[in-house]
Amino acid sequence: MTLNKDAKFGKSFWASKGEKVKVVGISGNAITCENKKGLKFPCNIKDLE
């Protein structure tokens, strides 16, 4: 999947717009994604293509 916008919260920055991510878990509208470096982060389902 590809991100529509930057994945960040406060001072934490996980992935940038257009980056390919792997979906690890789904819970309602919240998704746990993993980037190429293996870092897992929360994401909204609407933020993915």
Image: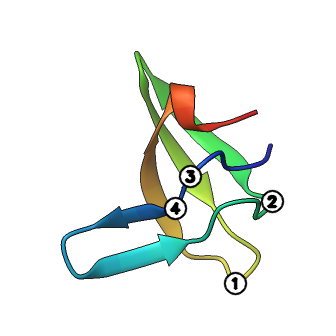
Q: Nearer the viewer, mark 4 or mark 2?
A: 4
Of the two numbered discs 4 and 2 on the same chain, state the one appearing first in sequence: 4
Q: CA distance from mark 4 to mark 3?
A: 4 Å
Corner quadrant of residue 24: top right
Q: Residue at x 51, y 65 (%)?
A: 40
Q: As drawn, is 18 to the left or to the right of 43?
A: right
Q: Residue at x 65, y 45 (%)?
A: 4
Q: Amino acid type of disc 3?
A: Lys
Question: Which label number is shown at residue 17?
Answer: none
Q: Which residue is mark 2?
A: 20
Q: Residue at x 58, y 52 (%)?
A: 33
Q: Nearer the viewer, mark 1 or mark 2?
A: 2
Labels in figure, total: 4
Question: Which label number is shown at residue 37?
Answer: 1
Q: Is residue 32 above or below residue 44?
A: below
Q: CA distance from mark 1 to mark 2?
A: 11 Å
User: Residue 7 at x, y = what percent?
Assistant: 47, 60
Counting other residues with Cα less than 10 Å from the Cα at mark 2, is it few (<14), some (14-19), or many (20 or more)? Answer: some
Q: Nearer the viewer, mark 3 or mark 2?
A: 3
| Image quadrant occupied by the N terminus | top right
Q: Which residue is mark 4?
A: 6
Element type at mark 2: loop
Q: CA distance from mark 4 to mark 1?
A: 16 Å
Give yes or no for contact between labels 4 and 3 (Cβ–Cβ under 8 Å).
Answer: yes
